[in-house]
Image: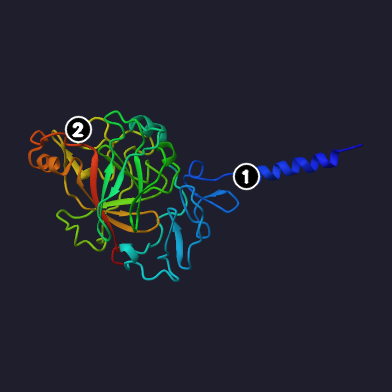
Amino acid sequence: MRRYPLLLVNVAALLLTACSNRTCGPTNCVGGCCTAMGECVEGTALQCGIGGTACTQCAAGEICGAGTCVKDGTGGGGGSAGGMGGGGEVDAGQPRCTMPTTVPCQDESTMQLALRTVVNTDEVVEEGSAPNFKTRIDARAGGLNPQSSYQYLRFTPTGMQKVMIDDDTAFTSMDWEIAFRRYVIRVNAGVSGPGCTAVARTAPNTDFDALAQAPAGLSWRTEEYFTTPGCSFVPDPSGLPGGPGTALSSYWTYQQCVQVTNNVYVIHTRNGQYVKFQVLSYYDPGAQMICNATGSTQGHPGDPMSAVLRVRWGFIAPPPP
């Protein structure tokens, strides 16, 4: 008796079972969300999410920005651009880009910046609240010879949120906006990442608390710590060996310690939001005060706890038209 039809049925059943048991989660869907069918997809308004969570559908007048539903400031139901949203968030304006840009000089970055494939699991703690957040970022990454990747983060209405990716993945991820390791702070743009985030330094002595709108006429930068073409390294001006000249590197100077300059920056994110940003300390706050005043941390009792940064930031309105 021939049993081929039954055999075909059994094979089909096995294939169907294999498909239905396909899993999607945080380990294999870092940059997207999981549909009801178990598929990992990049965020859209219909299927929004990140980190392998279940996809959600954004409400009318919202778009999916970095895995989170945010108001669409491009028109139609999103409210007026620049108005304060719930939790201190400002409505997103026109996205700077919707598709990943090409990231040049990746091999050179890997070597020069000692990039790692170990995801950084160190702590990020929100110590403030909207509208002016204060975030403590453990950027030690294992010490002077880093053992893990940068801390990859994004700005959200409830504080900075970790994006659990390694340095290699960051070259293709649109989900992060800012990254920290030791004294280096990078944004997702140019030779650093595909996300077209831009940074501008405000005028000297800008009052952080009073800054509610991005000033007109700012000079915007992306990450250009390698020349393109050519991939020649562009160092920071401190004189320390190996430090890249990032868009935010003027937050510090160096004598015998990292002194913060109190410069205030505006960060224009990929999804169109504007964020004011200032580094408060690189060391324990007490040690930072001594460093700023004397150029050394020698007067501080005990461990100054370097590379645990405190920054303050908040969403602000777009510049005047």
Q: Amino acid at mark 2?
A: Gly
Q: Mark 1 = which residue?
A: 21
Residue occupying the point 48% across, 66% down: 59
Looking at the rendered image, the disc whose residue lies closer to the viewer, 2 or 1, is: 1
Q: Which mark is residue 301?
A: none
Q: Earlier in the sequence, mark 2 or mark 1?
A: 1
Q: Position of residue 199 (x, y in %)?
A: 30, 51
Rendered location of residue 297, percent (x, y): 12, 35
Please state, as top left, top right, bottom left or bottom right, where the C terminus lies in the image.
bottom left
Seen in the image, is 79 located left or right of residue 289? right
Tag 2 secondary structure: loop
**Picture coordinates of residue 203, whole percent (x, y):** 18, 55
Density class for disc 1 (Cα within 10 Å; few <14, some 14-19, many ≥20) is few
Task: From the viewer's side, name the closer residue of 182 and 248.
Answer: 182
| 112 sits left or right of 280 in the view | right
Q: Residue at x 30, y 49 (%)?
A: 221
Q: Contact (CB < 8 A) between labels 2 and 1?
A: no
Element at label 1? loop
Q: Residues within 10 Å of mark 2 (few under 14, many from 20)?
A: few
Residue 132, quarter of the rendered image = bottom left
Picture coordinates of residue 315, whole percent (x, y): 30, 59
- Seen in the picture, residue 119 relative to 271 is either above or below; the reply is above
Report how far apart the C-alphas of labels 2 and 1 lie in the structure. 55 Å
Task: Name the residue rendered at 83%, 41% in the picture.
Answer: 6
On the image, numbered disc 2 is attached to which residue? 239
Q: Is residue 258 above or below residue 269?
A: above
Amino acid type of disc 1? Asn
Displayed quadrant of residue 304: top left
